[in-house]
Amino acid sequence: MRVDKFLWCVRYFKTRSIATNACKQGKVRLGDEILKPSKEVFPGDKLRVRKNQINYEIEVLDTPKSRVGAKLVNLYIHDITPKEAFEKLDLLKYSKDYYRKKGTGRPTKKDRRDIDDWFENAADEIKKPKEKEDE
């Protein structure tokens, strides 16, 4: 079975064209080899799929005849993705959570005070090295 069709059948991608584009962009690998969408997949192959900033590692157990239900996916693949990959994603979500998106409007009072404090601290740090040089 073609790798793009397989990834679509086991619900790693919502559409087959998205799976094909992922293969073309080099996000699907077998070992160190980047797979083309038409590459055949066999039971026992270990695929690495980069999706949503996570490198998923899956082992092919069997190839389905057509797209399978979510409850039956475990019959065809075994997910061997390390837990560290998911922990990194959680940290990334927390780090992005604080920042405001561009175009969200004017800063709030708290944002404005934080900006003013940052400018004051930056100005103080710039002045300190000059005072030491004069001594």
Image (spheres, grey):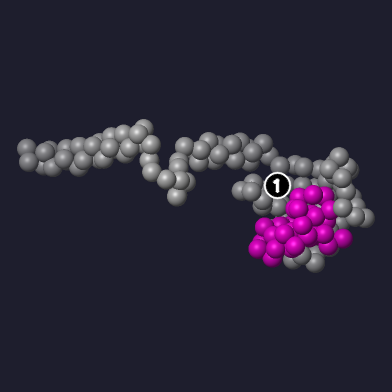
Verify whether residue 62 appears in magenta.
no
Which is nearer the eye, 106 or 51?
106
Position of 122 with respect to 58 (left or right) is: left
- What is the x, y in percent for residue 66? 90, 55
- What is the x, y in percent for residue 88? 58, 39
Residue drawn where x is 73% and y is 47% of the image: 57
The residue identified by callout 1 is: 56
Which three-letter amino acid code belongs to the residue tagged 1?
Tyr
Displayed quadrant of residue 133: top left
Query: In the picture shown, does residue 65 fall above or below 92?
Result: below
Displayed quadrant of residue 35: bottom right
- Residue 33 visible within the image: no
> In the picture, which quadrant includes the N terminus?
bottom right
- Which residue reaches farthest right? 65
Would you call the spot at circle 1 few (<14 residues within 10 Å), some (14-19), or many (20 or more)? some
Position of 90 with respect to 4 (left or right) is: left
- Residue 17 visible within the image: yes
Query: In the picture shown, does residue 27 fall above or below 109?
Result: below
- What is the x, y in percent for residue 94? 53, 36
Residue drawn where x is 59% and y is 36% of the image: 90
- What is the x, y in percent for residue 117? 28, 34
Provide the secondary structure element on which disc 1 rests: strand
Task: State the extent of the magenta-drawn residues as a range.
Answer: 1-30
Residue drawn where x is 86% and y is 56% of the image: 42
> In the picture, which quadrant includes the C terminus?
top left
Query: In the picture shown, does residue 107 fall above or below 24?
Result: above
Verify whether residue 10 appears in magenta.
yes
Residue drawn where x is 50% and y is 41% of the image: 96
Q: How many marks?
A: 1
